[in-house]
Image: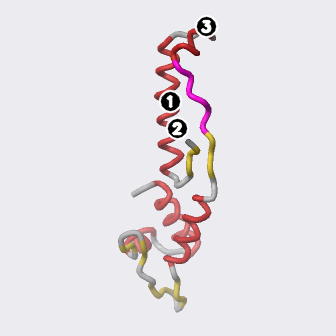
Amino acid sequence: MDESRKQFEEYVAKKLRLPFEMITEARNGDRYFAFSSMDIRHSLNEWWTLWQASRSAIEITAPKFIDSREALAKGFTVDYSNGFGDGMDAYEENIRAVGVKVKE
């Protein structure tokens, strides 16, 4: 399960005061079954759509990659450039996992 969906389901469970498992059991692919609880009809699909839209509206610009030549010119080693690249890859992967776009 991606991190954004997990955060959404935890948030909904807390707000509705329902067990987390009840929310995950309502999952149907990328949608949710509407269910009745406490005499209130909840549309998780609408909430999920709004949650996704709020996340997709955010876009982060990642710092510029430092290539080997640039690292050497700044007094760093090539290993610095490689480590920076690996760190940026991990950074971008984690940002995308919560549903936020990383500007290319």
Question: Looking at the image, is mark 3 or mark 1 earlier in the sequence?
Answer: 3
In this picture, is 100 found above or below 30? above
Q: Are marks 3 and 2 in contact (CB under 8 Å)?
A: no
Numbered circle sitting on residue 91: 2
Neighbor class of circle 3 (other Cα within 10 Å; few <14, some 14-19, many 20+) is few
Q: CA–CA distance between discs 3 and 2? A: 24 Å
Q: Quadrant of the C terminus?
A: top right
Residue denoted by label 1 = 87
Q: Which residues are magenta?
A: 62-67
x, y percent for residue 41: 52, 88
x, y percent for residue 100: 56, 52
Q: Is residue 63 magenta?
A: yes
Of circles 3 and 1, which is in front? 3
x, y percent for residue 8: 52, 64
Residue denoted by label 3 = 75
Instruction: Name the residue located 49 percent from the left edge and 77 percent from the top edge.
Output: 45
Instruction: Name the residue located 52 percent from the left edge and 70 percent from the top edge.
Output: 48
Q: Nearer the viewer, residue 8 or 62?
A: 62
Query: Magenta region's main secondary structure?
Result: loop
